[in-house]
């Protein structure tokens, strides 16, 4: 019974995330690039993104009390999110409010924080802040407060 309840919650979360992402495409055009952008390079350090490539279980939460439950849902890997290598050493992933994939790169800011995003300085509103990353799990959130409120904090668990 508990398994079915968790499965239903997972299905609803995935459906909600997809619906929000697709419906927001028409309403938040200023957050999405109009043309494909190359991954980051510039006066900051870029990091190898190879360890991100692969299949990941993905789920999101908004409150820390939901993190453990969200990790369990992500570990199920029922509908893996595939992160592929980009043509210029970045990774292909979706950005907020856009169903297309773009090549993104890991960027290290001067304060030591790591971000995932386009060829802009680290911490750009379109970036995601990497909260933690191991070979088996990644946790990240959008820098833009509005996108972060809508999507929450993402947990990726390697399948």
Image: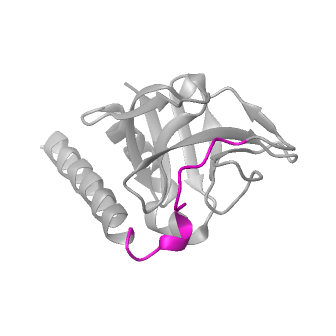
Q: Is residue 38 magenta?
A: yes
Say which of 27 and 52 sits in front. 27
Q: Residue at x 75, y 51 (%)?
A: 122
Which residue reaches farthest front?
35
Is residue 127 left or right of 150 when viewed as pictured? right
Which residue reaches farthest bottom?
27
Residue 77, relative to residue 144: is it above or below?
above
Q: How many marks?
A: 0
Q: Residue at x 24, y 56 (%)?
A: 15
Segment colored magenta: 25-40
Q: Quadrant of residue 76?
A: top left
Which quadrant of the figure contains the N terminus? top left
Residue 96, relative to residue 50: is it above or below?
below
Which quadrant of the figure contains the C terminus? top left
What is the x, y in percent for residue 151? 45, 61
What is the x, y in percent for residue 33? 55, 60
What is the x, y in percent for residue 24? 38, 70
Q: Residue at x 64, y 60 (%)?
A: 143
What is the x, y in percent for residue 116? 63, 44
Residue 126, relative to residue 133: is it above or below?
below
- Specify the principal SS of the magenta part: loop
Q: Residue at x 84, y 42 (%)?
A: 44
């Amino acid at each position: 019974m508990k398994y079915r309840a968790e499965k239903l919650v997972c299905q609803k979360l995935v459906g909600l995330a997809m619906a929000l992402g697709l419906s927001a495409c028409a309403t938040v055009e200023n957050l999405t690039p109009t043309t494909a952008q190359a991954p980051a390079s510039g006066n900051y350090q870029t990091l190898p993104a190879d360890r991100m490539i692969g299949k990941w279980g993905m789920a999101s939460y908004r409150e820390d009390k939901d993190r453990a439950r969200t990790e369990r849902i992500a570990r199920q890997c029922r509908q893996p999110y595939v992160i592929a290598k980009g043509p210029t050493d970045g990774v292909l992933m979706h950005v907020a409010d856009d169903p297309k994939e773009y090549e993104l790169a890991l960027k290290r800011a001067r304060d030591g924080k790591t971000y995932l995003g386009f060829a802009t300085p680290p911490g750009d509103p379109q970036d995601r802040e990497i909260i933690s990353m191991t070979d088996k799990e990644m946790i990240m959130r959008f820098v833009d407060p509005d996108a972060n409120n809508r999507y929450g904090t993402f947990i990726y668990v390697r399948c």
